[in-house]
Image: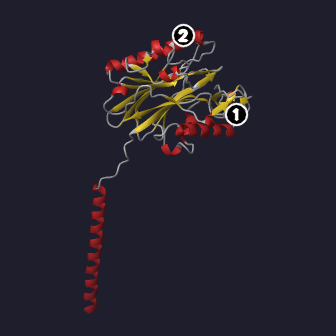
Amino acid sequence: MLPNIMKLLLAVKYNRFLFLMLAAGSLLLINSCSAPRKSAPEVKATSVVFYNVENLFDTINNQGERDFEFSPESPKKWNTERYNKKLNDISHVLMDVDTVGEPGLIGMAEIEDQAVLNDLVRTKRMAPVHYKIIHEESPDYRGIDVALLYRPDIFKEISHTVIGIHFKDDPDYHTRDILYAKLLSGKHDTLNVFVNHWPSRLGGLKKSQPKRVFVASVLRAQVDSLLAINPRTKIIIMGDMNDEPENKSLFDVLKAIPGTDGTLHSLLYQASMQGKGTYYFRGNWNMLDNLVVSHDLLTAKSGWSTVPASGMVFHEKWMEYHNKQGEMAPNRTYGGSNYYGGISDHFPVYFILHR
């Protein structure tokens, strides 16, 4: 009889212990679920960068595409070692471009396809940021496109599309589409971003100008349609326009002017007037890469904003080439078929957004 009583007492004691343990565990679970989680600190400033990276092609010669020039069998002898060096150099530039952290938005020109963008964002310097990619193939005769990268901790994509460029007087001429992306930051702050790479100056400035004027008119029509819906629309226009802020396409047609008058504002006009530029040609600097914003980005009382003339050209000594006369230029990857081992024949441009 006594042993049975002892067993009963032990069982009661064990079950009481088990009950207390389960109760304690339930309380911990409830507390962990109800306790507020610490969110990531809000980003107060971020940079917007545009960079023409000079023919970022992989080494694969895709049948039917125009990329033989950048393959191991071509006169350029483009190979994996050179490709990886270029990827790492570009990531170095982009991650060092300013002092407020990794850029929130990065526009790019002269990239081959989605595959090279995937390789770029996976480089050691860029991988921790987890950049998202917006890209579409364009009909450009050289096989190069534009793209937009964005930080997903700051922006969310609402939508994107391409704006095709079709020349009625020259239907066989194919150039890059304009990439348009609509992004949301926070709950209400919407940014409309246009990434451009306008027709080149091949054949001379005056002869080639009408094509860039036409592209500028197409872009202006898109801007006007957005502003007609909401005059306070926040717009960012970036790209290699192959024209300078004071040229007809940008100043007269797109109507991107300095200061705070009008609806579009060139952030690099004053720098261009001071003789600064992103591309060096025959002894002269040209501000071919441009940054333009809508009026509300200069006057907004909430969300993201910037200030007039805030555009900057970024370059460091390791990005430069100095000739025997001491002239400095961007250190390019190739000159014809000659491999120079540089990063790009353009310097990037950027500005800072503040909340």
Relative to 101, is 31 above or below?
below
Q: Nearer the viewer, residue 35 or 25?
A: 35
Secondary structure state at the residue bearing disc 1 = loop
Q: Quadrant of residue 297?
A: top left
Coordinates of residue 109 in the picture (x, y in percent): 55, 27
Q: Is residue 328 above or below residue 101?
A: above
> Which mark, by number, is residue 78?
1
- Which tag, 2 or 1, sits closer to the chain's start? 1
Give the residue type at disc 1.
Trp
Label 2, on which residue?
210
* Mark 1 Cα shell of 10 Å, populated few (<14), some (14-19), many (≥20): many
- Residue 342 in the image: x percent, y percent? 66, 34
On the rendered structure, is 311 left or right of 85? left
Please name whichever residue, 203 or 164, is drawn nearer the observer in this view of the structure.
Answer: 203
Amino acid type of disc 2? Answer: Pro
Q: State the separation of the CA atoms marked 2 and 1.
A: 35 Å
Please tell me whether mark 2 sits on a helix, a strand or a loop: helix
Q: Residue at x 27, y 80 (%)?
A: 13
Is 157 on the left-hand or right-hand side of 28?
A: right
Q: Position of residue 89 (x, y in %)?
A: 61, 38
Q: Nearer the viewer, residue 79 or 250?
A: 250
Q: Residue furthest bottom?
A: 2
Query: Is 238 situated left or right of 1 in this image?
Result: right
- Residue at (41, 38) in percent of width and height: 45
